[in-house]
Image (cartoon, rainbow, N blue to C red):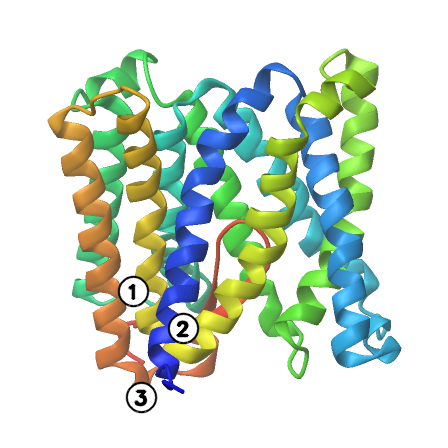
């Protein structure tokens, strides 16, 4: 029997997961006209959370469900990550093109660099600053299709800004995992997701009261089951399991490069659907990819000198991933 190298298996899992996440935006976009962002977030994580809790019990036992006196902190972090990111991402996707929204998650490692440096009160290295600048420039090119002044005029970027804000909240959520040493990624994800669902439910109730949300009927949900199944089963549950396993096999610094396949997949789907991206959009995606590669290689080069507090987990979609070393000047 042919033995497949561990790195090859890991790469295949990471690539498959990133492609699934890239397709998630195009698959979810049609749901925006049927289910409001608040209710869609509740449906997504209201089903995902019990699945993660069941997996947690299966893998680590019933004892792993204990909050150990950290329930309030887990609730707050789950609110930031799952309620904040979930609702803002869908609010943004409602008005943004799917391929534009898909570029934002690829910048999460760069957002994490800025947040980690701010928390450590240290200036990032020149290489990392260059990577962040390239990433932001790439996003602007994609969002404005090569016309940056549209951001000032208000003609572009509103939906993408909401997705970016949600991605930033997700980075804070993943950084919060450092406060739970000894906990597995699955335990942190499952418990924080379950508590975050309480906040999502509260937001949904408020949205109902304000007239911004309404519960879809059974006919709507039955007609949307393929999209919902993909969003929950493929992008959320299988995506987390595949990404975690792939990261362990490949190593975080190199494995995170596969996140580049998210916007690439989204743009490929757009092309298949008949939309031809302009040169500025393609150049923007290339800049984001170059920025992530530059930052990742900087982390590999300096990994031995990076302290524990400068190592942050990478996230995209649902769940905490492996850690990626970030270089901070003076460390």
Mark earlier in primary sequence (1, 3): 1
In which quadrant of the rendered image does the C terminus lie?
bottom left
Residue at the spot of label 3? 304
- Label 1 and label 3: CA atoms lie apart by 19 Å
Classify mark 2: helix, strand or loop.
helix
Give the number of the mark in front: 2 or 1: 2
Q: In the rendered image, which quarter is residue 307 located in?
A: bottom left
Instruction: Identify the residue at image location x=25%, y=16%.
Output: 150
- Label 2 and label 1: CA atoms lie apart by 33 Å
Q: Is residue 197 above or below residue 40?
A: below
Residue at the spot of label 1? 123
Q: Residues within 10 Å of mark 1 (few under 14, many from 20)?
A: some
Instruction: Identify the residue at image location x=17%, y=64%.
Output: 127
Classify mark 1: helix, strand or loop.
loop
Q: Residues within 10 Å of mark 3 (few under 14, many from 20)?
A: few
Task: Give how far across and how far down residue 184 sits, in percent.
Answer: 65, 77
Task: Give the mark count.
Answer: 3
Judge whether residue 325 can be spotted in this image. Answer: no
Q: Nearer the viewer, residue 250 or 107?
A: 250
Residue at the spot of label 2? 10
Q: Is residue 311 above or below residue 217?
A: below
């Amino acid at each position: 029997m042919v033995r497949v190298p561990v790195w090859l298996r890991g790469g295949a899992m990471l690539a498959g997961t990133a492609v699934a996440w890239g397709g998630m935006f195009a698959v979810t976009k049609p749901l925006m006209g049927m289910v409001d962002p608040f209710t869609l977030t509740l449906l997504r994580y209201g089903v995902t959370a019990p699945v993660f809790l069941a997996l947690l019990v299966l893998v680590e036992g019933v004892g792993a469900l204990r909050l150990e006196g950290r329930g309030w902190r887990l609730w707050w972090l789950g609110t930031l990550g799952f309620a904040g990111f979930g609702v803002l991402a869908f609010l943004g996707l409602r008005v943004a093109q799917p391929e534009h929204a898909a570029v934002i998650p690829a910048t999460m490692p760069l957002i994490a660099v800025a947040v980690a440096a701010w928390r450590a009160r240290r200036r990032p290295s020149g290489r990392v600053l260059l990577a962040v600048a390239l990433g932001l420039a790439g996003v602007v090119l994609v969002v404005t299709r090569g016309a940056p002044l549209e951001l000032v005029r208000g003609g572009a970027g509103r939906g993408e800004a909401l997705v970016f804000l949600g991605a930033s909240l997700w980075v804070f959520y993943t950084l919060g995992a450092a406060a739970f040493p000894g906990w597995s990624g699955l335990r942190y994800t499952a418990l924080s997701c379950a508590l975050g669902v309480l906040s999502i439910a509260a937001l949904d109730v408020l949205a109902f009261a304000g007239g911004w949300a309404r519960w879809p009927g059974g006919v709507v949900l039955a007609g949307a089951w393929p999209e919902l199944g993909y969003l929950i089963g493929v992008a959320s549950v299988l995506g987390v399991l595949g990404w975690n396993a792939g990261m362990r096999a490949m190593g975080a610094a190199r494995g995170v490069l596969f996140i580049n396949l998210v916007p690439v997949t989204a743009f490929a789907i757009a092309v298949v659907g008949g939309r031809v991206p302009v040169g500025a959009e393609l150049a923007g995606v290339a800049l984001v990819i170059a920025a992530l590669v530059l930052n990742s290689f900087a982390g590999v080069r300096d990994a031995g000198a990076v302290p524990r507090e400068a190592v942050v987990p990478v996230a995209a979609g649902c769940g905490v991933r492996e850690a990626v070393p970030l270089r901070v000047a003076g460390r």
